Image (cartoon, coloured by chain):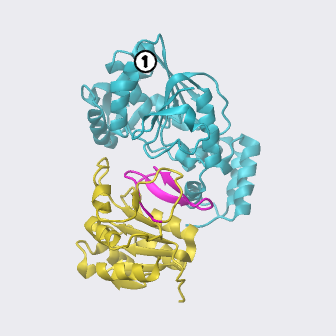
Chain colours: A yellow, B cyan
């Protein structure tokens, strides 16, 4: 299948063990990196503090936990807030939050975020699924793939918890299986 | 998820608006379409048109539909740090008033109504309070009045209550019946429940505190603007509006007429 090279948005999902992985990816991006990044990681409910500080260490852009209706901007990375699902409003390119029930035992749910983003950004999405011990995200990667976006799973051999990327790989919706370092290089090659 | 075409959505919205005076086109589409998709597959409708016919013919079914497509998940003392500010600062600052008027706008199944009543009790302000609890949906109002919740909800509610500075144990305020808890009905003595649609609502009274938490996230920007206007008209000067932790007043045209009393907890004070 011919894939678009025009990546307008990067989405990253993960669970157990994913915080250092996402930090490595973010900190590998150069100053002035433009493509917005949306990060959806499972997090402890009612322990909202701390994750943001760890993730943004050595990251040159701005890391934001968006409010409802906050616009998506270049040069920023956005992290799904604790205890909310993170969706994207189609027309306005703003975030849209929801407190509806847990999905795959999770709120935020990676599937909901990924599907909502692929509905809006179609084939201009780069989806990345990293380490995690839950199948949440596999269906979302499938959504991204079906809309023509590019999909990357972290190499399960390198994962603290391989189940999450493995579940996506089993759906046959993954274009590339890469290590963290290779993921960073891929982003640098294909995004601005 | 199925994406609906604009034409079928407009058909549904127009029919519902004409018959029931609720404008669903002002809702946040990302969430609404998800809920519609879920509703259609759960209740076996093969199209939006089929669903629309049923809604127009059957008022009771319409109420059920509204309950199902709106999101009613809530907790007692959700975001305990916010409730701690209400306990330690907001309510004490109002204690000299002869009456403390409170509006829970979009009260859902009533968890926050009980939370507030418990706070008022523990602060000795219970008899001063006059509370309105409103929701779009009749069924959830009935649930709120009954005050029966799942036993499963107890651990998180108890944890929130303690973190918010609760003085006792939450079980002081309920009794256990099978797999449910029954809240003490005296807590609702000063509460009046009413059906009220924020999307068509006009001001009906003035308040010292309005709580509208995680309700406006389901509205689009236009409706959010209208609702903020409604709230502004419904507040006394120097009184408070408290919205959800990840909601923001920043996009409201008259935001400057409010001060950020506590930015992190989204507590604003009307200053002009």
Location of residue A156 in the rendering, given as x and y in whole percent from the top left corner:
28, 79
Q: Is residue B262 visible?
A: yes
Q: Secondary structure at mark 1?
A: loop
- How far from the left and from the top, in percent, is residue A171? 41, 80
Relative to B162, is A65 on the left or the right?
right
Q: Which residue appears farthest toward the bottom when viewing the image? A: A1
Q: Quadrant of residue B236?
A: top right
Q: Quadrant of the C terminus of chain B?
A: top right
Q: Is residue B241 left or right of residue A188?
A: right
Is residue A162 highlighted in magenta?
A: no
**Chain designation of label 1:** B
The foreground one among A138 and A190 is A190
**Residue at the outermost top position:** B98
Q: Residue at image x 52%, y 53%?
A: A70
Q: Which residue is mark 1?
A: B94
As drawn, B259 above or below A86: above
What percent of the width, then of the height, locates residue B10? 73, 56
Percent of width and height locating residue A130: 33, 73
Residue density around tag 1, few if under 14, some if 14–19, many if 20 or more, within 10 Å: some
Which image quarter is the N terminus of chain B in?
A: bottom right
Q: Residue furthest front?
A: A31
What is the span of residues highlighted in magenta in the rendered image? A75-102
Residue B209 seen in render: no
């Amino acid at each position: 299948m011919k894939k678009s090279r025009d990546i307008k948005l990067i989405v990253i999902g993960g669970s157990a063990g994913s915080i250092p992985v996402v930090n490595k990816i973010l900190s590998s991006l150069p100053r002035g990196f433009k493509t917005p990044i949306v990060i959806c990681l499972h997090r402890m409910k009612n322990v909202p503090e701390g994750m943001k500080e760890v993730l943004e260490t050595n990251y040159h852009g701005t890391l934001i936990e968006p409010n409802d209706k906050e616009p998506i901007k270049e040069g920023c990375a956005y992290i799904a807030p604790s205890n909310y699902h993170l969706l994207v409003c189609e027309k306005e390119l703003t975030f849209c939050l929801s407190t509806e029930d847990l999905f795959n035992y999770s709120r935020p749910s990676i599937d909901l975020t990924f599907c909502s983003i692929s509905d809006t950004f179609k084939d201009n999405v780069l989806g990345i699924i990293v380490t995690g011990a839950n199948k949440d995200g596999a269906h979302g990667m499938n959504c991204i793939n079906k809309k023509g976006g590019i999909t990357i799973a972290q190499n399960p051999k390198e994962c603290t918890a391989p189940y999450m990327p493995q579940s996506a790989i089993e759906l046959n919706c993954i274009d590339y299986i890469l290590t963290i370092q290779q993921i960073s290089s891929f982003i640098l090659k294909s995004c601005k | 998820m199925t994406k609906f075409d604009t034409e079928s959505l407009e058909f549904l919205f127009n029919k519902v608006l004409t018959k029931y005076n609720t404008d669903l086109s002002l809702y946040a589409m990302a969430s609404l379409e998800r809920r519609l998709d879920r509703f259609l597959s759960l209740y076996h409708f093969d199209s939006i048109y089929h669903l629309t016919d049923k809604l127009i013919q059957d008022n009771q079914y319409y109420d059920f539909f509204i309950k199902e497509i709106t999101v009613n998940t809530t907790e007692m003392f959700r975001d305990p740090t916010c409730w701690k500010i209400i306990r330690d600062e907001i309510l004490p600052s109002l204690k000299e008033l002869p009456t403390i008027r409170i509006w829970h706008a979009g009260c859902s199944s009533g968890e926050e109504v009980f939370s507030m009543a418990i706070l008022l009790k523990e602060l000795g302000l219970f008899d001063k309070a006059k509370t309105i609890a409103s929701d779009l949906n009749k069924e959830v109002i009935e649930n709120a009045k009954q005050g029966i919740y799942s036993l499963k909800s107890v651990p998180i509610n108890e944890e929130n209550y303690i973190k918010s500075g609760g003085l006792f144990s939450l079980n002081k305020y309920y009794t256990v019946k099978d797999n449910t808890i029954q809240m003490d009905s005296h807590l609702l003595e000063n509460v009046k429940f009413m059906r009220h649609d924020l999307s068509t609502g006009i001001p009906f009274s003035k308040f010292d505190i309005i709580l509208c938490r995680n309700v406006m996230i389901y509205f689009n920007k236009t409706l959010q603007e209208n609702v903020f206007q409604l709230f502004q008209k419904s507040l006394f000067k120097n009184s408070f509006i408290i919205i959800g932790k990840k909601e923001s007043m920043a996009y409201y045209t008259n935001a400057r007429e409010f001060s950020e009393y506590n930015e992190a907890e989204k507590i604003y004070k009307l200053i002009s």
